[in-house]
Amino acid sequence: MRTRSSLLLAVFLLCAAPVCMTRGQSPESGEIPIDTPYVTSPAQIVDAMLELAQVKNSDVVYDLGCGDGRIVISAAKKYGARGVGIDINADRIQEARANARAAGVDGEVVFETKDLFESDIRDATVVALYLLPEVNMRLRPRLLSELRPGTRVVTHSFAMGDWKPDKEIVIDGDPVYLWTIPAKR
């Protein structure tokens, strides 16, 4: 049986044509390249990610590539955390804002249409990711250099190369990983 992560990878490979990979004509046009297809995390994965990261009401949860906002909305609703969702797709951001209003947490969460590689993530105490492996690897140096020691990073399905996770669980065949940003050397 195929896992959700292998299906995501298959979708990505099938959509490798430029029309699927970019939202616009070129970076010069002001459009931001899309590095990962939009695939949602099921509710049980979202719950597992937040539990594994031990989210609490003092946390600021960032979801890079937030899609419809379900991770930060759940963090706010279930744990009282504040949240920031970042996605390059303006339609997803509008949907996330509507979902936050419907959930009654629009005062606790903010959604921004931005490139996750250029977004300020320094305030995060938890970072959630459901990105492809190569995108995780491109993001990893920023996570390690910009996040404060003790910040938790949690991913759905895809690891971070040779960066060994602190914990790994499997939910319905999909791995969920947790890392903690180490002290600066």
Image (tube, helix red, strand yellow):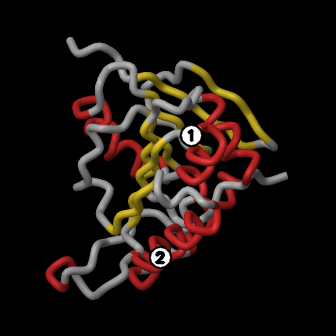
Query: Mark 1 or mark 2, which has the lower sequence index?
Result: 1
- Along the viewing direction, whichever of 73 and 50 lies nearer the viewer: 73
Residue 29 visible from this viewpoint: yes
- 141 left or right, relative to 170: left
Image: 22 above or below 36: below
Toward which corner of the image does residue 170 lie, by quadrant? Answer: top right
Residue appearing at x 46%, y 30% in the figure? 58
Residue matched to label 2? 94
Q: Secondary structure at mark 2?
A: helix
Name the residue at the right extreme: 1
Q: Which amino acid type is marked by label 1? A: Gly
Left or right: 113 in relation to 4: left
Residue at the spot 40% in from the left edge and 32% down from the top edge:
125
Q: Nearer the viewer, mark 1 or mark 2?
A: 1
Q: Quadrant of residue 169?
A: top right
Quarter holding the C terminus?
Answer: top left
Q: Quadrant of residue 56?
A: top right
